[in-house]
Image (tube, grey):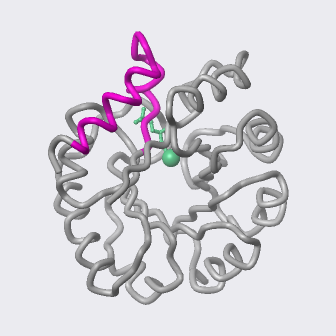
Amino acid sequence: MSVIIAPSILSADFARLGDEVRMLEAGGADWIHVDVMDGRFVPNLTFGTKVIETVRRVTALPIDVHLMVVEPERYFDDFAAAGASGLTIHPEVSPHLHRQLTRIRELGCLAGAALNPSTSLEAVAEVVPELDLLLVMTVNPGFGGQRFIGSMVDKVRRARAVLDGAASAARLQVDGGINRETIATAWRAGADAFVAGNAVFAAPDPQDEIRALRDRCVTVA
Ligand code: DX5
Ligand code: ZN
């Protein structure tokens, strides 16, 4: 199983965003994770179309957009046109999940669903065939630099069983508090795509950190 390392630009230096993204690409990042927050679904506010366009201009890597917003469907067309490769939405604020995931695929993007720590896997049980990515949040979304919630490891294990049971090829992603220790635990539990913000950008050498994170998966496999 290949490993996807997706650094989150939430922890980047926004004054040097283009350079930061080029640095991630040169350092072996697989995807660039873009956290869109609306101040409603989550308490924080971040960015939108313009930042996605900016990232698109400086990298050929897939752009993995995590929508922590209410009514995410309002942004699908603009974000896809701006260069998003994947759009991940939260079922907590997307009652018509089947319709939205189908629409994301129609736009040519990978369709993802993200579950808050308190949201059961049941929330996606009926749409597994519509998923290209299942994101198990390992913190409560809203901020970078939070601590990994250890009890989510069992949820990752159960999510892996759900995907395998449905013969789904969807990626199983984790997001929040991923570092050299927690990535190994999540990998063993069945995750294969890893978002890392603080771990990468607070490291003395972010490119070395990307390699170290990836190595942690391979060596414990
Ligand atoms: C959390 C975001 C994450 C965040 C992860 O709300 O969805 O993508 O950037 O940051 P770290 O790795 O610092 O926990
Ligand atoms: Zn995220």
Task: Indicate whether 204 appears above or below 186.
Answer: above
- Figure disc tally: 0
* Drawn side of residue 168 relative to residue 147, left or right: right
Quadrant in which the N terminus is drawn: bottom left
Q: Residue at x 63, y 57 (%)?
A: 69
Q: Please provide percent x and percent y for residue 10.
A: 57, 32
Report the residue at 46% width, 63% height from top: 114
| Residue 163: quarter of image | bottom left
Question: Quick check: 167 above or below 154?
Answer: below
Identify which residue is drawn at 46% across, 32% down: 197
In the image, 180 versus 138, the foreground residue is 180
Which segment is the magenta one? 195-218
**Residue 8 is inside the magenta segment:** no
Whole-percent x, y for residue 34 in the image? 61, 43
Determine the main secondary structure of the stretch shown in magenta.
Answer: helix
Residue 21 occupies quadrant: top right
Q: Is residue 36 left or right of residue 175?
A: right
Residue 159 at x, y = what percent?
A: 28, 70
Which residue appears at 27% of the width and 40% of the height? 148
Residue found farthest to the top: 204
Magenta stretch containing residue 207, yes or no? yes
Left or right position of 71 against 186: right
Q: Pick whichever, 52 or 141, lies toward us.
A: 52
205 sits left or right of 39 in the view: left
Indicate the position of residue 51 as horizontal and vertical percent values. 76, 38
Quarter of the image where one finds residue 44: top right
